[in-house]
Amino acid sequence: MTVESEAKKPEISSPVVDNLSGFKQLLLPVIDRNEYLTEGTKQATATVAALAKTYGAEITVVVIDDEKENGSMGSEHETRLASIRWHLSEGGFKEFKMLERLGEGKKPTAIIGEVAEEMKMDLVVMSMEAVHSKQVDANLLAEFIPCPVLLLPL
């Protein structure tokens, strides 16, 4: 490759890419029931950690789980929380906020919207896996989430 051809490479620029540094509050919703996290959730966790590290943002995780086992969450739930902590620490984050929305009877999309609005989030990062599994309604996300939503492909 010559110096001339390198100089002609176009720069990637868009309003979203140019403004990523403005996203200081990142929300990572975790909806899946896999105690060791699905590949989509692992990807979303790694992405939110990379964005937060690059742009100096804070991470808030909201674990959404409607099912309770005989009035208690059981060891699967604790393992899932430990998995989230482990994956974020692998991305360089030991300190982050973790919220749990358990047994509220609300749809995950509504909970994500409420948390994003209450906590004044700048960006929600999640996998399309939640949309494909019909846990989250993408149309409602687009309509009711008060900030941009980054949906990662499977």
Image: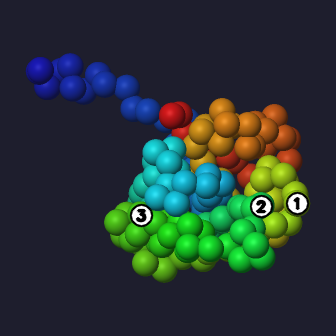
Judge whether 6 appears above or below 41 on screen: above
Q: Amino acid at mark 2?
A: Asp
Is residue 103 visible to the viewer in this orientation of the structure?
A: yes
The amino acid marked with disc number 3 is His
Q: CA distance from mark 3 to mark 2?
A: 23 Å
> Is 90 on the left or on the right of 58, as rendered?
left
For the residue labelled by badge 2, is the local secondary structure a helix, a strand or a loop? loop
Mark 1 / mark 3, whichever is N-terminal: 3
Pinpoint residue 86: horizontal percent, then vertical percent. Answer: 41, 69
Determine which quarter of the picture holds residue 150.
top right
**Residue 40: assigned label:** none
Q: Which residue is mark 1?
A: 105
Of pointers 3 and 2, the one earlier in the residue sequence: 2
Front-most of 134 and 52?
134
Query: Closer to the observer: label 3 or label 2?
Result: 2
Q: CA distance from mark 1 to mark 2?
A: 6 Å
Verify CB contact (< 8 Å) between mark 1 and mark 3: no
Name the residue rendered at 55%, 39% in the picture.
152
Mark 1 residue type: Gly
Whether the residues at callouts 1 and 2 have beta carbons within 8 Å, the answer is yes
Q: CA distance from mark 1 to mark 3?
A: 28 Å
Name the foreground residue: 124 vs 111.
Answer: 111
Instruction: Classify 10 Å Cα crowding around label 1: few (below 14), some (14-19), many (20 and above).
Output: few
Which image quarter: residue 70?
bottom right
> CB atoms at circles 3 and 2 under 8 Å apart?
no
46 versus 90 height, above or below: above
The residue identified by callout 3 is 87
**Relative image position of residue 72 (x, y in whole percent):** 71, 77
Label 3 CA crowd tier, 10 Å (few <14, some 14–19, many 20+) = many
Q: Which residue has dot 2 on it?
A: 66
